Each structure stands twice: as C-alpha cells, then as structure tokens.
Amino acid sequence: MARDRGPFKLDNPWPRFAWWSTAGLLAISLILGFIVLGREQQNGPTLGTWAAICRALGVTADVGPAGEPQPPLRTPSRIAWTSATLTQIGAGNAEHGAFVALNCTACHGEKGVSQAGLYPTLAGMDGIAIYKQLDDFRASKRSWGAMNAIAQALSAQDSADVGAYFASRTNGLPPFVGERFQAGHTLREDNPAVRLVFAGDPARGIPPCAACHGPGDHKLGAPQLKTQQPAYIERQLAAFAQGFRQNDINEQMRTIAAQLTPDEMRVVAEFYGTGAAVAQVAGR
Amino acid sequence: MVVNMTAWKRDNPGRPVPLAMFAITATALLWAWAASGVEIEVAGILLPRAFGWSDLIDAALGRTLFSVTLHSIVYFWLMPAYIAFYTLVAEAAGGRLYSDTMGRLTFIMFLVFSLPVGMHHLLADPEHGSGFKFVQSFLTFLVALPTLLTVFSISATLEIAGRHRGGRGLLGWIGALPWNEPMVLAVGLSLLMLGLGGFGGLINMSYAMNSMIHNSSWVTAHFHLIFGGAAVIMYFAIAYEMWPRITGKPLRSKRLACWQLWLWFWGMLITTIPWHIAGLMGQPRRIAIFDYNIPLVARTAALVITSVMGGLVLLIAATLLIIILVRSHLGERALTQPLRYALAVNPPQQVPAALNGFALWNAVLLAVMVVTYGYPIGQFFFLKSHSVPAVQVTSQESASMGAR
C-alpha cells in the first residue's frame, strides 16, 4: 500500500497536481486581477504596474470624484452619532442642567412645558435630541431668533446637562420606552393621520412617522412627538418642506415633508399634538 | 462524520472509503469551514456589542466575514442533491455508476472551490479594491468544473442504465430509462433546472456582468431555481426513497409522486422565468409593495402575476408531497428492500491516499483561503476602519401596552 502513504509528499502525483494546479490558478487570477485589469482606466491613461497593483488593492488616492464642478459642500449638522458624542451626552449632569434650564423658562414654559404653539415642550424630550438641536443652533445649522445666541452661550457640556435635565422631567412628553408598535394599521386605514403615522405612504416614498418618532419605535436623534405642541409640529413640517430648516442629517425630513400636502401636515400635527396618539395607544 | 470516517479507515486499512461516506464527510467539512466566517463575526463583532463592551461595529469587516459563510452555505444545501446523484440514481435507474473517481473529484472540488469565492457577493461594496474581487470572481468560475463533471458522469450513468434496459441508437437509451421512477425523473428535472440556473449564476458572479443585475430580482430568481428547484426536487426524491425505509411502509403510488415532481418543476419554471425577466427590467429584490401607478413598475405587472401563479403551483406540489407521505404512512407495513448505494462500473479496489481522505485538500484550501481572504480581512486591522455606532433598533421593554 505504498500509494496510501504521504498525501503531502510532492513526489506523489496527486499532491503534486493539487499544489501546482492551485498555485497556477491563483497566479493566473492574481496577474489578471492586479496587473492586467487594474491597469486599464475608462477615461484615463493606462497605469504602471505598481499603480495598478495599489489600485487593485483599493489603496490609491485617485478614487475621488472626477474633476467636474461641484456645488459647495453644505453639511446639515456637525453632529455624528459616534461613541464619543453618545458618551458625552450620557455624561450629562441633570442637577447642573436644572440651573442652565432657567434660561429656557421664558419661552418653553415653566419646567419646560410650553404654553404657546410657537415653542416646543422640552420636558420629557430625549436628551440626545435636545443636544443635537442645541449644537445645530450653535453652529447656525438651524436658525430661530434667540435660540442661536442662547446656544452659542452654552458649552457642549451645558447642552448635555440641560438635555439630561429635561429628559428626566416626567411632566411633559411621555418617554419612548414601554410601547409596542401598533399593528393592524394598514394602508387601507380611513383616517389619513393614522394612516400616515402608522403605515406611511409608500407610493410617495413616505415612511410611517412612528417608525422614528414613536409610538412604538425610535431612531437615534429623533424627538418623540406625542403631546408636542401641534402648531409647532406643523410649522416644522412646513419649514422642512420649504427648505428653511435643513438640519436633518440624511435629508429624511425634507424629503418626507416635501411630499405632504398642507392638510396632511395639519392632521398629522393634530394627531400627535392633541393626544389622539395617546388615545390610539390606550384604546387598543 | 470525520470521526466516523477516521474510525472506518482504521478498521478497514487499505480499502477505499465508500463514496457515500466520502461525500457526506466532504459536506460536513464544508459546513465547518463555511461556518468559520460567521463564527468569527459573531464572536468578534456582534457579541462584544451585544454585551455592551463596545458600541461600535465594523460593518465592512462584518460583511467580509459573512461573505465567507454566505456562498458556501449555498453549496452546503446543494451537496445532498449531488450525493443522491452519485449514490442513489444508478440503482433507481437499474444500472451502475459511471465513475467512482469522478464522484470523489467532484466533492473534493466543491470543498476547495466553494469557499474562496464569497466576495462575489461584495462586487458592489466600496471597502474592497477591484483586485481580490476579480480573483474570487475568477475562482467562482471553477465551480463550473465539478458541476459539468457531474452532469457528464450522471448522464453517462443514465446511458449505461438505458442501454442495459435495451435502449439502442444515439438517443434511444433516453426513452428506455424508467421515467416512472421518482428518483430518475427527479434527476432529469433537476439537471434541467441546474443548467438554466447555472447559466444565470455565471452572470451573477462575473465581475462586469454582475452590475447589470446586482440586487435585482434576477438574483432571487436564480437562487430559487438552483436551490428551490435543482436541490429541493432531489430532496423530494430522497424523501420518496428514504421514507418507506424509515417507516417500513412502501410508497403507495409512484405515479402520484411523479405528478408531484412534474408540478414542482413547472411551478418553479413559471415562478422564476418571469422573475428573471422582471429583474432584467430593473425590478429590485426585497420589495414588499408593488405600486403599479409608477410606469416603471406597471411594466412588470404581468410578469409578477405570472410568477405568483407559479408560486400557487408550487404550493399545490408541496401539499401533494405531504399527502403522498401521509397516505403511504397510513398504509400497511410491508418489507421493503434495504437501501443500496450505487456500485461503480469499475468498483475501486484501491485509490490514492489523496482521493481517500481530506488532509491534502484541507491544506490546499487553507492556503487558498489565506491568499484570497488574507488581505481583504487583514486590511481592516492596519489600513482602514469602518466602525460605525450600532443602533439598537428595538427597545420594547414592556408588553403591557398595545398588546390587548
């Protein structure tokens, strides 16, 4: 049984065949992939061998856009949801935040519950959302009269603190946790507000509001809307639709709001603001 | 499987491992190799996030590791069908296997060539350069080798059986085959679907052609045809072969079983051919809503509806499968012949060590994996990081509200 011994010995025919054919196939594919294919460019000069290999490895600097005129870059926000940002927000000190929040009472109401349609209620709002809006005001990514000046007077730590303070208040917006997504609302729903909030309108590319703003689900940075001032919600939808407000990171709110009719903005705002959303959850 | 095969070789020194055992061990090894990608991804990326040790995940590294598993999993599904081709078909057709060595080579090639190819699922991913995408695309082409080898040797096996049964002339043996045997019928239909789906697969894995059909419903149609068609129809035939042997109750009606296989075949074609066309017309995969108000979508309406009809035929065929098995199970117990694996025309007396075990091929595979995946995975550790914060999608702590 000499043939049974030494599957790795290269003087046996099968191991020799296996290793040489594998090496040959790899060599052919590496030469084709790294030297021949990497060399050719559609609209540029043929590259040298070394440049071709680097390009095939994906480590070249020439992968940027072609030299065509580009509109000036405008970033919607300075905030990115990195762990550093989230750690800073998480370290907010609610006690110091209560002191900072004295600045807010004139417009946003005592203890952060707004009494006027122009201003949003802050009590109970997600601290992450408050932090992002304050930074956007500070960097003039969002504009609203006094808010830009106020935000510039606050440090990043102050923003985190005041966010933590308002998030800890229980007298305002209900928190995100503890609710399930409302099943059973479909595109055939009669009430347009309920349909938009829970099912959206795929034909126009409108996702359900509840997928980010609750009830039942939540995306990072999106504020909860239940019991928010309806006039405020409607005004923000209009601002997004007309491009006055542009600080949504992925342009999602501008895209959605531009698809809504004024009537739809009003009924959605009322649905959230007047507590219909609360009744909807409680009634099921 | 590996332990069993080692024990068998120890007890039977110098004798060739039976093809069925060799093939099943190849499948087990393929599974072990394939799982490594997802295992590393889960242990190295997902669990640290789940335990809260890190709030970042490297999405690009995760996708690359998953690609190791992604494609070889598909071959893991296909292997039982191939095992049936090589070990059950010849017996059912009343002949002998054309070549034992071709069977061994097929399973070895499947083991070696189905792993270093996963990046053909990442051809549109920005985290990799073009080089290794091309290399893995090139290696994917080689999967055609064991496939074509199998088509050749199974056709030859069937020809041997057909001629043995009295078929004459160039094609006369085809008519002489026992097409009323579920296993023989299933092989014919399976090879047809494997051919159609295989040519579609060549387009999927081509670096350039892939961009035409990337993430379109062409891809979904392709893997339904290969897996749902070519592989699953063999699973049915295996069930008709094995079920009576497990329960001791013979199949009541082979005629009904053949009907079931034909229905499944036509259902799968009616489902997937329009689906392929819709993909070429630009229909994306993974869509839940078809809004026919949009002109682009409206053009695919007839195709989508035809495809759904095919799905209904498949549903009927699947129901029929259960009816056949239950009906047979309610029948009387009768002694059935024990299962016999196919004998080759020239049964192997002794085979080279390389074709009697997997040590050499595991080593070859390891070398190829290091060459093809070493840089694509290694680059994340010294060149680029694609870490992004992982967002917790669900935070439903209480079921008290809304559950009523």
Image (cartoon, rainbow, N blue to C red):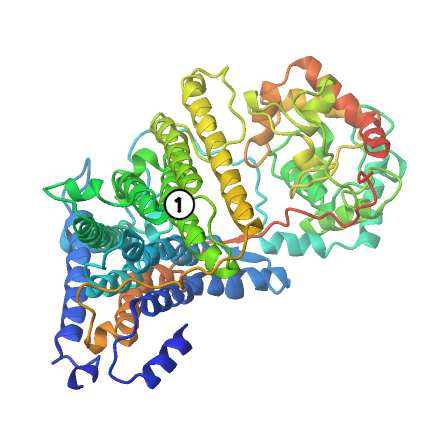
Circle 1: residue type = Ile
Q: Position of residue A82 (x, y in %)?
A: 57, 52
Query: Can residue A115 be seen here?
Result: yes
The residue lying toward the viewer, choosing from B124 and A80, is B124
The residue lying toward the viewer, choosing from B329 and B14, is B329
**Side of A111 where B328 appears, left or right:** left
The residue lying toward the viewer, choosing from B122 and B352, is B352
Q: Quadrant of residue A105?
A: top right
Q: Quadrant of the N terminus of chain B?
A: bottom left
Q: Position of residue B364 (x, y in %)?
A: 25, 70
Task: Report the residue at 33% width, 57% height from top.
Answer: B88
| Local secondary structure at mark 1 | helix
Vertical order, B279 against B250 (above or below):
above
The residue lying toward the viewer, choosing from B53 and A237, is B53
* Residue annotated with mark 1: B233
Task: Report the residue at 60% width, 55% height from top.
Answer: A83
Q: Position of residue B322 (x, y in %)?
A: 53, 44
Q: Quadrant of the C terminus of chain B?
A: top right
Vertical order, A89 against A72 (above or below):
below
Q: Position of residue A189 (x, y in %)?
A: 71, 21
Q: Chain of mark 1?
A: B
Task: Report the residue at 74% width, 34% height from top.
Answer: A182
Q: How many marks?
A: 1
Q: Quadrant of residue A70?
A: top left
Q: Quadrant of residue B192?
A: top left
Vertical order, B196 against A201 (above or below):
below
Query: Can residue A242 be seen here?
Result: no
Mark 1 crowd level (few <14, some 14–19, many ≥20, 10 Å Cα): many
Q: Outermost residue toward the left?
A: B169
**Side of B118 where A181 appears, left or right:** right
**Side of B252 where A141 appears, left or right:** right
